[in-house]
């Protein structure tokens, strides 16, 4: 559906009409690569804890999300229904928008760690749309101040069973 792709592009594109960054006094600077935390992503056990805590909804916007591993399992069974190339236009628009991310609230580039308090589950447009900015610089409320969305949505995890 083109409208889903247009929505994603409107959020993570460099010309997004919705996302405007603002300077914040005292915000942590962007660090050179050699000063960033070496292990960038949470490990498998940490990811499972995040799934339990956050469920399978974006902590920013609340849409349902699907892990890459689940998408790959579905693609194996339905390769023609779920195209996933290397470029954005070659990827299934809905699975792209619903792509589960492990998003660092204090961005990795700004010194953010894999501490579970610093990592939340988000959708790809919210993660990539924020670039390496803090929630204050984006001007959104810290998602940790509200409860995760709870629903019967299971992230299609049953495809891995
Ligand atoms: Zn989102």
Image (cartoon, helix red, strand yellow):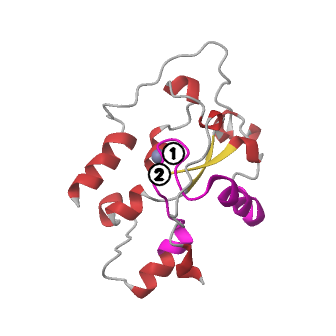
Q: Are marks 2 and 1 in contact (CB under 8 Å)?
A: yes
> As displayed, is residue 62 above or below residue 79?
above
Q: Which residue is mark 2?
A: 124
Q: Residue furthest top?
A: 25
Residues 84 and 105: in front is: 105
For residue 99, side relative to residue 54 (left or right): left
Q: Which residue is mark 1?
A: 127
Find the magenta span and give its range: 42-71
> As displayed, is residue 66 above or below residue 35?
below
Q: Secondary structure at mark 1?
A: helix
Label 1 neighbourhood size at 10 Å, few (<14), some (14-19), many (20+)? many
Q: Quadrant of the N terminus?
A: bottom left
Residue at left offset 50%, top offset 80%: 73
Q: Check if residue 63 falls in the magenta segment.
A: yes
Residue at left offset 35%, top offset 75%: 82
Q: CA distance from mark 2 to mark 1?
A: 5 Å
Q: Is mark 2 within 8 Å of ligand 1?
A: yes
Residues 74 and 157: in front is: 157
Q: Is mark 1 within 8 Å of ligand 1?
A: yes
Q: Quarter of the image holding residue 69?
A: bottom right
For residue 93, side relative to residue 124 (left or right): left
Give the mark count.
Answer: 2
Task: Give percent across and percent down for residue 22.
Answer: 48, 19
Q: Quarter of the image holding residue 88?
A: bottom left
What number is the disc on residue 139? none
Task: Give percent across and percent down for residue 12.
Answer: 39, 43
Q: Residue furthest left?
A: 2
């Amino acid at each position: 559906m083109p409208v889903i792709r247009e929505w994603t592009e409107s959020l993570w594109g460099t010309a997004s009409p919705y996302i405007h960054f603002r300077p914040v006094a005292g915000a942590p600077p962007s660090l050179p690569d050699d000063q960033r935390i070496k292990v960038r992503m949470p490990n498998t056990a940490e990811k499972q804890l995040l799934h339990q805590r956050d469920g399978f909804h974006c902590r920013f916007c609340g849409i349902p999300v699907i892990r890459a591993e689940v998408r790959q399992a579905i693609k194996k069974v339905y390769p023609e229904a779920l195209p996933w190339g290397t470029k954005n236009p070659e990827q299934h628009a809905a699975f792209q928008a619903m792509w589960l991310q492990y998003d660092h609230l204090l961005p990795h580039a700004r010194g953010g760690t894999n501490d579970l308090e610093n990592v939340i589950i988000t959708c790809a447009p919210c993660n990539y749309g924020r670039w390496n900015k803090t929630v204050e610089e984006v001007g959104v409320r810290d998602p940790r101040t509200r409860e995760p969305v709870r629903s019967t949505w299971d992230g299609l995890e049953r495809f891995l069973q």
